[in-house]
Each structure stands twice: as C-alpha cells, then as structure tokens.
Image: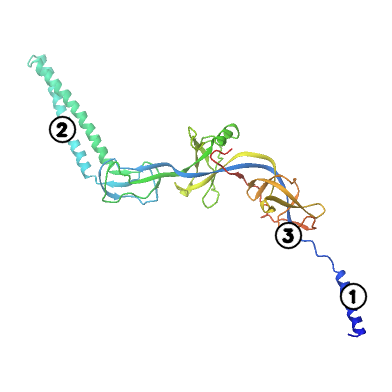
Amino acid sequence: MNTRALAVFGSTLWMLSCHKGSAPPPPAPTVQVTAVIQQDVPVYREWVGTLDGFVNAEIRPQVTGYIQKQAFREGTLVQEGNLLFLIDPRNYKDSADQAKSTLDRNIATLAKARLDVQRDKELIAAQAITRQQFDNDLAAEREAAASVEQSRAALRQAQLSHGWTQVTSPIAGIAGIVQVQVGDLVNTSTTMTTVSQVDPIKAQFNISEVEYLRSVQGNHWVEAGESAERTLQLILADGSVYSHRGVVIVINRQVDQRTGTIAVQGSFPNPGNVLRPGQYGKVRAAINTRKNVLLVPQRAIVEVQGASQVGVVGSDGKVDIRVVKTAEQVGPLMVIENGLSAGDKVIVSDLTRLRPGMPVRAVPASDSTTASAEPATGGSSPRGQ
C-alpha cells in the first residue's frame, strides 16, 4: 500500500471516530407511575361455606298405596299446597264411606234411645213402668251417644287418610328429583322427593373461637338477626362475587372441641333461585379496619431473592429501588408496611429492565393499573389467631 493510500485510510478513520463521538445520548426510557395511596382499609376474612335450603322438606306419604299420578315436574318451583303425587284412593274412600254409614246408623240409634227415655219419663210418672226399665233406657241412651262420638272420630280418621292420598307440598320451593315412579307401592317410610325453600338460602361456615371472641368484643359482624347489618359476601365457585349481601342468622350454641371452631349460618337473598343447596362458596366478612395504610398496585412489586422491591421515581427523575414489607392484598393493590411514603411515585411498568440511578421519563399509569382498593382478605385456619 502506497503512502497516499495510507493517508486516505487514516483520514477516513479519523472522520468516523469524530462522527461517533458527536452522537447524542439515547433518550431516557418511559415508565408508568402512580402515587402511593393512603386510606383506611377494611380487612376481610374468608371461610369455605356450604349452601343449603332454608327449609328442606322430605316428602313422605302418610298412607300406604300405589302411586297413580305424579303431578309436578322435577326441578321446578312448586307452591305450598300444590299436588305432588296421587296415591290410589279407592280403599280409603270405601273406608270413609263405611265410617259415614256407621255414624248414620249410630245417630239413628241415639235418636231412638232419646225417644225411649222421653217416653219413659211420662210412663214412670204415671207408674206405668218400673224404675229398672227407666234406668236401662237411660244407659242405652248414653251408650248410643258414646257410639256416635266414636263413629265421628272414625269418620274423621278415614276422611283424613283419604285426603292423604293426595300428597301435597308443605312449603313453596324447588322440587328435587323423584325417588319413586308411578305404579310403585309406597308407605310412610318412603321418601318420594324433597322440596327446598331456596329464597332466601342458607350458607353455613365455621369460624375460629378467636375470631368469634374478637367479633363479640369488636365490630360485632357475627351478631345474629335478620334485622342486623348485611355484613356477609358470597364468592361463588367461579370466583365471582354474588350480587346480594347476606346476614348472620344463627350462631351455634357451642364450639367444636375437635376443631376449635363454631358453626355460623348466614342467609342470602336468592331471587330467581340461582343458588342451589349443596353448592360450595367462600363467605367473606370484614373483621377489622386498618387505619391510614399505604397501598400500591400489586404489579409494582417485584420479588427478588425473597425480598419485595418497588421502583420509585425521585424528584430528580431517577430510579430508586426500595425494599418494602408487604401485608394484606386489597383487590389489585397491596398493603405496604414500610419502605414507602404517601405520595411516592412507584413504577408500575417493567421494573426488571431498570437500574438504580437510571434517568427515566415518568408518565401517569392507566386507570386499569391503578384500580381502587377492594376488601383486604386474609386466610383462615381452624384455630386462626
């Protein structure tokens, strides 16, 4: 390579190095931030609950016989007094007719006995009959009267049995699957179906002895009574929160010594009979209120080697990584015990690509990122403290 070529090559390298040195620095990355919230937060606790009908009426016949008819559709709403089944009534109708005939005969016998006594009173006054005959006729009248009362009782019983051949619903509710069918012979021990009153519906759950005592001494959320404040929420199996709140109606008389829990029953409105007996759900209630706690979006927290970290944008526009202590979850937010102050601007976008001291451009986070606080929840163990 000649001298001129080397000079040209060196000049080119010098110009390239000069151009590279004059390149502007890259722009600061954009991060989404939101201010630390400070507010009162109700602390909720959840317990696994089981739904049950407010009344569950097992339908059993009061008489023995063959089923002639099923008068309802399974799984539908029936009203109090609606006919459910018809048992063959012929034998019971014959028995009622026979009892009616016996009563009529005994009434006639009583009428004749009374006439005899009335006539005897006139005859004995004229000394036309003996006193013994008069006494015999009086006894016959009393016996005839007793027979009439006995016949009336037998007729009432026969009519009652005849009426029981029509098996009706004692309550308004949802009729369950039928356990018998037309033509089956049933008796008083046969369960034909079950009708459940499901509006309102009951939810039973168990709280610890400590939770019960704290409620009695504190906010009284477990106080029973239909007129009490509706403090209960129901979380269904799909995770949705039931739209109607419930109220505590029953607190069991004793603590289960095996588990250290006490059974509680709540009542929830159930328009449309959406909830059914046997469903599982979580019953939630506010057991305490934490005053002036700090809250940040849960997505702002990053776990690094067992420690919770939050990125904060300082007044100088640079990133500050802080270790924080978390507590209860409050919907999409998390309670922060220490490490932050009210008003701090925490980063809710990707924190893993940022480093302490890095300059950033902070923009307000979207509404979906900074959702408002919901009830704080905590776990519950049988002997939870």
208 in relation to 347, above or below: above
Amino acid identity at mark 3: Arg
Amino acid identity at mark 1: Trp
> Which label sits in the foreground, 1 or 3?
1
Tag count: 3
Q: Position of residue 344 (x, y in %)?
A: 76, 49
Task: Looking at the picture, tell me which residue is in the foreground, 232 or 344.
Answer: 344
Whether label 1 touches label 3, CB < 8 Å: no
Give the alpha-carbon distance from disc 1 to disc 3, as whole Å.
35 Å
The image quarter containing residue 158 is: top left
Q: Position of residue 3 (x, y in %)?
A: 92, 84
Direction bottom: furthest residue: 2
Q: Is residue 139 left or right of residue 231?
A: left
Task: Looking at the picture, tell me which residue is in the foreground, 112 or 233.
Answer: 233
> Which label sits in the foreground, 3 or 2?
3
Direction front: furthest residue: 1
Q: Is residue 104 left or right of residue 247?
A: left
Which residue matches tag 1? 14
Q: Position of residue 140 (x, y in %)?
A: 14, 23
* Quadrant housing the N terminus: bottom right
Which residue appears at 47% of the width and 45% of the height? 51
Q: Residues within 10 Å of mark 1 (few under 14, many from 20)?
A: few
Q: Position of residue 199 (x, y in %)?
A: 46, 44
Which residue matches tag 3? 353
Tell me which numbered mark, 3 or 2, is placed earlier along the sequence. Answer: 2
Q: Secondary structure at mark 2?
A: helix
Task: Looking at the picture, tell me which residue is in the foreground, 206 or 88.
Answer: 206
Tell me which numbered mark, 1 or 3, is placed earlier along the sequence. Answer: 1
Q: Secondary structure at mark 3?
A: loop
Which residue matches tag 2? 105
Q: Secondary structure at mark 1?
A: helix
Amino acid identity at mark 2: Arg
